[in-house]
Amino acid sequence: MYTLNLNQLSPQEFLNEYWQKKPVVIRQGFKDFVDPISADEVAGLAMEEQVESRLVHKKDGQWQAAFGPFESYEHLGSENWSLVVQALDNFSEEAAEMIEPFRFIPHWRLDDLMASFATPGGSVGPHIDNYDVFICQGSGKRRWRVGACGEHVEFAAHEALLHVEPFEAIIDAELEAGDILYIPPGFPHEGITLETSMSFSVGFRGNSSVSVLSAFADHLIDNEHGSELLTDPNRQVVNQSGEISNDDYASIKKQVASLLDDDAIFKTFTGQFLTAAKHDLDILLPDEPFDLTEVSNLLNSHAIKRLGGLRAFYFEDTIEQGLCYINGSELAFSAEIANGVKLLCDKVMLLPDDLSDWSHNAAFVELATELLNQGYWYLAEAE
């Protein structure tokens, strides 16, 4: 388990001073840090079809980028290339532990855990991200430059690489194992590897209004909501037929706004939208389906662990009514087990002691059996 050291700041003090405000280097944020996964393992993951990966290097002074899966890396030599693997938390239990210290930020804001292996001189180039990121340096060293937030010109250095023009650095630092660099959205930055290294980035997403509205429109269409026509039974005679009156404009706007104001519709959409997996999940179904009696007994002796990358959330005012959201779907359950479901959503691993009040509750055991058989949770040895 990783312990986050915020340089004598409490999590709330860090949020107050830095979160979405300014970048900062946190020296030895993870003390005695050891890579949770080797470079060879990262390279192996990038050879798999279901893993999203990218290779960035320069050829004849020009930036090059390619998306995996990759067959080999020997042709790249020993300098000036970087390999990036997304959603490492979906495929490595050990690496996923790095996310746990950041749970003072709600999990619905989490994007994923990214791994980067780079040879000396390796970089993905100067760029701007639209998400918050904690870049945790692993083995080796990397130099990071971060500029101020402001008007920066971006350009396509390659069809798969959006870079930013040169910027003046407000942070220029070498990171060693255990150091963490926090960068809010909008701050240009560039990391250049000084010696063969690994780094791990815990990213937190913020969806744009356009992306939310687009997804909401799809939700309305899929569920046949919002098909009611605009009505105006009290229509008055007009003298200017080409005019859209203020009253008519208000009616049109109200028609659309009413969908956003309908909590039953918009909460269901929000729960499904925020729990939808961005990357493929590494689901492994049990060899044989579990039955209720078996699960009741197993909950007394085994821990249950949530699948890496699986998203499970609830709203504070509907959980008690028996509603939560898992992997893009709304799940209804008996309201009597609401506190047990909160545990499933709040914690990655639940030990037998956590489940002592629930292992003989028929409704909870039924739900746990369903989740285990779906491969969303799995049995783990109690630590």
Image (cartoon, grey):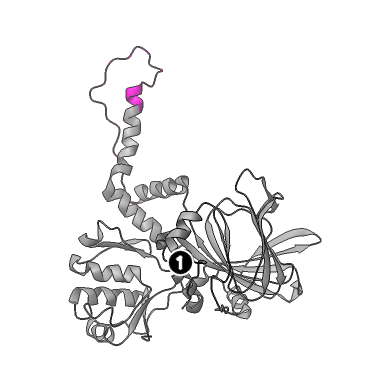
Query: In the image, is residue 250 above or below residue 102?
Result: above
The answer to if 204 sits in the magenta stretch is no
The image shows residue 321 at horizontal and vertical percentages of 21, 60
Magenta segment, prevailing SS (helix, strand or loop): loop
Between 225 and 363, the one nearer to me in the picture: 363
Q: Quadrant of residue 235?
A: top left
Query: Is the C terminus in the top left, top right, bottom left or bottom right quadrant?
Result: bottom left
Query: In the image, is residue 128 above or below residue 111?
Result: above
Residue at the spot x=27%, y=69% of the render? 341
176 relative position to 253: left or right: right
Can residue 101 be seen here? The reply is yes
Q: Please give the range of residues in magenta.
A: 223-249
Q: Quadrant of residue 193?
A: bottom right
Residue at the spot x=80%, y=59% of the render? 61
Residue at the spot x=60%, y=78% of the render? 44
The answer to if 231 sits in the magenta stretch is yes
Q: Which residue, as the protein is rendered here, is positioned at the far top?
A: 239
The image shows residue 200 at horizontal and vertical percentages of 57, 69
Residue under label 1, please give it: 102
The image shows residue 194 at horizontal and vertical percentages of 72, 70
